[in-house]
Image (cartoon, coloured by chain):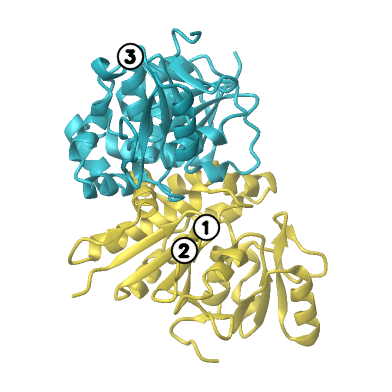
Chain colours: A yellow, B cyan
Amino acid sequence: MKTKRIDVFLLPTLLGETDLSGGVAVVIDVLRATTTITHAIAHKADCVVPLLNVDDAKEEGARQPAALLGGERGGQKIDGFDLGNSPAEYPESTVAGKKILFTTTNGTKAMQACRTAQDIYIAAFVNLTAVCNQLADCPHIFVVCAGTTGEITREDVLLAGAIVDVLSADALKPIELNDQAQIAADAWLEAKTGLTATTLADRLKKSRGGRNVLRLGLDNDIDIAAALDKFDVVPKLNPKTWEIRDSRNPAP
Amino acid sequence: MKTKRIDVFLLPTLLGETDLSGGVAVVIDVLRATTTITHAIAHKADCVVPLLNVDDAKEEGARQPAALLGGERGGQKIDGFDLGNSPAEYPESTVAGKKILFTTTNGTKAMQACRTAQDIYIAAFVNLTAVCNQLADCPHIFVVCAGTTGEITREDVLLAGAIVDVLSADALKPIELNDQAQIAADAWLEAKTGLTATTLADRLKKSRGGRNVLRLGLDNDIDIAAALDKFDVVPKLNPKTWEIRDSRNPAP
């Protein structure tokens, strides 16, 4: 059996010159991009296309009038877009069967930073166990936290640590971890004692990302993001087609 | 009473455009620069002058023949230098009364990144309590981890978290923390349970910096670095004179 290795990066910029081509990547932006994308895919959106710029999304939207435009700038819905970045805006009645052209401040950049990986998975607390099951047989995993406008945020680090913790507990022999993975696991283990959705939501509210979301009056988004294992679904970004689909149903 | 604030940076590069001019800085490079500097100052060296380049140190050494040259490249003593970067090389019999021209790979860069702060303190596990006492009345503290060749290292993060933990426990009201400070505190709290010098040394040996030191056969340096509160001394780097002296005796 090959040794398993997990490298966590607390920000996309900390990837530096790291070569991801031999492994799979996991992108984390708990508040709120990866939580929202997981809601969209769980609610049967056909696919989510992550785009870096608002203008790109609008141009693409003009070419594909059946697609929905979703995302945020400064945390708020973009003028002319159909949907913002709140998971509650992505129910099945809105998104089922739809393509969603999606742009957010931090999450999309983190996905771009992973584009040389073999596969890119989208992780949130709402699909933690499903993501860990998906990763069980991957020998080399790169977990990339989106952060908030270039700064490390605790909510992303906690989820990275939770992934390390679950995979370590399930592994038959010790997993090799970089120091950032060890630190993330420490943070999660400290949070895990007596953990409930309420205590997790409280922690998320204190993080940098959480404070930003509270400032926008979107407290409910944080409670939704803290609902551990709400979905048994793993959104998977195909680096070639640049579409995010349900990993169980990757082809259109 | 003013609110106290601690901002931790897990690497010097994460400071970005942060303005340190309103606060005091604490530099951490547990394995081994700040541990070794603390030994030198505790053992009555007159001062330590941190220099970025080997050539600068040699030129300065030629101008000041009474000074000792100390430091490392690739973890090892530099050709023509008097001393390496092991704390054991800096006993009182060698360093008392001496000026030490000192260059290391990571620690010196971290000090340079802090040069706009009002004061710069040098922290290690060997002087943890002394450093925290020194910081007790500082309203805004920037704690900067040196890391190892651009990567976050757990041993520095653990000490940053220990400083946050001690100052939070002593404070009369909650301290404002950035997310990196919260994460560092999480890591320390996870390590702190049942902590002894032996368990701390074991953790340090597993970190990136620790593995580098072990590879060089310098296990003893890690045991020395894990000796909590061995000294009641705080080395202080004067940003104007660029000399590190005992904070109780800052003027030459």
Same chain check for tags 3 and 2:
no
User: Image quarter for residue B203?
Assistant: top left
Q: Which residue is mark 3?
A: B232
Q: Residue furthest bottom?
A: A252
Looking at the picture, do discs 3 and 1 lie on one chain?
no
Q: Secondary structure at mark 3?
A: loop
As measured in the structure, the alpha-carbon distance from the residue carrying label 2 to the one carrying label 1 is 6 Å
In the rendered image, residue B195, in percent from the top left (x then y), is placed at 22, 32
Label ID, residue A126: 2
Q: CA distance from mark 3 to mark 1?
A: 46 Å
Q: Name the residue: 39% across, 18% down.
A: B66
Horizontal and vertical percent position of residue B212: 29, 48
Q: Residue at x 31, y 30 (%)?
A: B82
Q: Amino acid at mark 1?
A: Ala
B66 to the left or right of B173: left
Q: Which residue is mark 1?
A: A225
Left or right: residue B231 versus residue A143 is left
Quadrant location, the N terminus of chain B: top right
State the SS at label 1: helix
Respond whether the residues carrying marks 2 and 1 are from the same subunit. yes
Front residue of B202/A60: it is: B202
Mark 1: few/some/many CA within 10 Å (<14, 14-19, 20+): many
SS state under label 2 = helix
Q: CA distance from mark 3 to mark 2?
A: 48 Å
First in sequence, mark 2 or 1: give its number: 2
Where A168 sits versus B62, above or below? below
B13 vs B145, left or right, is right
Query: Amino acid type of disc 2?
Result: Val
Label 2 crowd (10 A; few <14 / some 14-19 / many >=20): many
Circles 2 and 1 in contact, beta carbons < 8 Å: yes
